[in-house]
Image: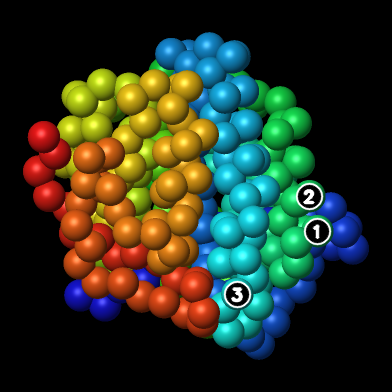
């Protein structure tokens, strides 16, 4: 199967806070779409732990170096928030990260972003929203044009309809897009992500609780940038193929296996 990974970038024209937004002939080295669960089972303190975890990961010097260390010297990221439906926010737009200052500004924006809502849990809703935004950007010759290293990264603490979740996964696979997961909590949630959310070439890193989320998301981003090997004890399968773009930048394409 031809592999492409999914992701998102963000842009507000002329704003240093959100980085460069114009289209460029050169693709980004990594496009990453963060799909974040904000359903009612996640209390405000847990939401804050999630956002702090993402923000601190983007402040990590190794991760920053990876995001800027590819052949084109830039990466792209966006964020989709979901519960029983998705929430439209300024983070929907693809953001281009081409300097340490832009990455730090993105981290600060994550750290201070107010929770957009709550509700039930529909993992497929977040996945499909990320797919829609990515495919539109690629189809219209936007800032991700020519990018082949694209990752959708879904995190959450709950399960939802298996048929709808599997359908979203199939849609990604048919578009040659990789979905990775960060399940939070019980083995049952991890099993759901393994069986219904991540693609055949994806992987998941489990956080046993929200207190463990920060370490898990930092590990996951390092794996996706190809800088550390996966840890099977934390629910990450052995690597299948590894695609690297530039020095220290790339994304792990990992095969699913049974979680024990």
- Counting from the top left corner in percent of width and height, residue 172 is at 32, 58
Q: Are marks 1 and 2 in contact (CB under 8 Å)?
A: yes
> Tell me, what colour scheme is on the image?
rainbow
The residue singled out by tag 1 in the image is 101
Residue 246 versus residue 81 in the image, above or below: below
Tell me which numbered mark, 2 or 3, is placed earlier along the sequence: 3
Helix, strand or loop at label 2? It is helix
Quarter of the rendering containing residue 210: top left
Quarter of the rendering containing residue 90: top right
Direction from residue 34 to residue 11 in the image, left or right: right
Residue 165 visible? The answer is: no
- Counting from the top left corner in percent of width and height, residue 137 is at 57, 66
Which of the two discs, 2 and 3, sits closer to the camera?
A: 3
Q: Nearer the viewer, residue 64 or 87?
A: 64
The residue singled out by tag 3 in the image is 69
In percent of the image, x 42 and y 38: which residue is there?
Answer: 216
In percent of the image, x 57 and y 35: which residue is there?
Answer: 53
Residue 133 visible? The answer is: yes
Helix, strand or loop at label 3? It is loop
Q: Which of 249 and 177 is in front in this view?
A: 249
Which of the labelled discs sits on residue 105, or is there none?
Answer: 2
Residue 98 versus residue 7 in the image, above or below: below
Direction from residue 176 to residue 33 in the image, left or right: right
Crowd class of label 3 (few under 14; some 14 to 19; many from 20; radius 10 Å): many
In percent of the image, x 62 and y 82: which residue is there?
Answer: 72
- Counting from the top left corner in percent of width and height, residue 132 is at 47, 55
Crowd class of label 1 (few under 14; some 14 to 19; many from 20; radius 10 Å): some
């Amino acid at each position: 199967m031809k592999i492409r990974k999914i992701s998102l970038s963000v842009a507000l024209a002329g704003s240093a806070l959100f980085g460069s937004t114009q289209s460029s002939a050169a693709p980004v080295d990594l496009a990453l779409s963060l799909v974040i669960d904000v359903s009612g089972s996640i209390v405000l303190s847990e939401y804050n732990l999630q956002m702090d975890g993402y923000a601190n990961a983007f402040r990590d010097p190794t991760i920053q170096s990876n995001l800027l260390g590819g052949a084109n010297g830039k990466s792209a990221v966006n964020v989709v928030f979901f519960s029983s439906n998705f929430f439209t926010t300024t983070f929907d737009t693809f953001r281009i990260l081409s300097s340490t200052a832009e990455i730090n500004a993105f981290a600060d924006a994550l750290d201070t972003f107010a929770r957009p809502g709550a509700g039930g849990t529909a993992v497929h809703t977040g996945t499909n929203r990320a797919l829609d935004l990515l495919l539109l950007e690629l189809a219209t010759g936007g800032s991700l044009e020519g990018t082949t290293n694209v990752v959708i990264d879904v995190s959450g603490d709950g399960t939802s309809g298996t048929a709808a979740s599997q359908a979203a996964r199939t849609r990604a696979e048919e578009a040659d897009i990789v979905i990775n997961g960060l399940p939070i909590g019980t083995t049952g949630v991890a099993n759901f992500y393994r069986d219904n959310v991540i693609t055949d070439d994806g992987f998941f890193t489990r956080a046993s609780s929200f207190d463990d989320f920060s370490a898990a998301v930092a590990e996951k981003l390092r794996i996706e940038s190809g800088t550390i090997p996966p840890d099977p004890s934390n629910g990450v399968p052995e690597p299948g193929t590894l695609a690297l773009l530039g020095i220290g930048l790339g994304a792990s394409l990992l095969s699913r296996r049974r979680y024990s």
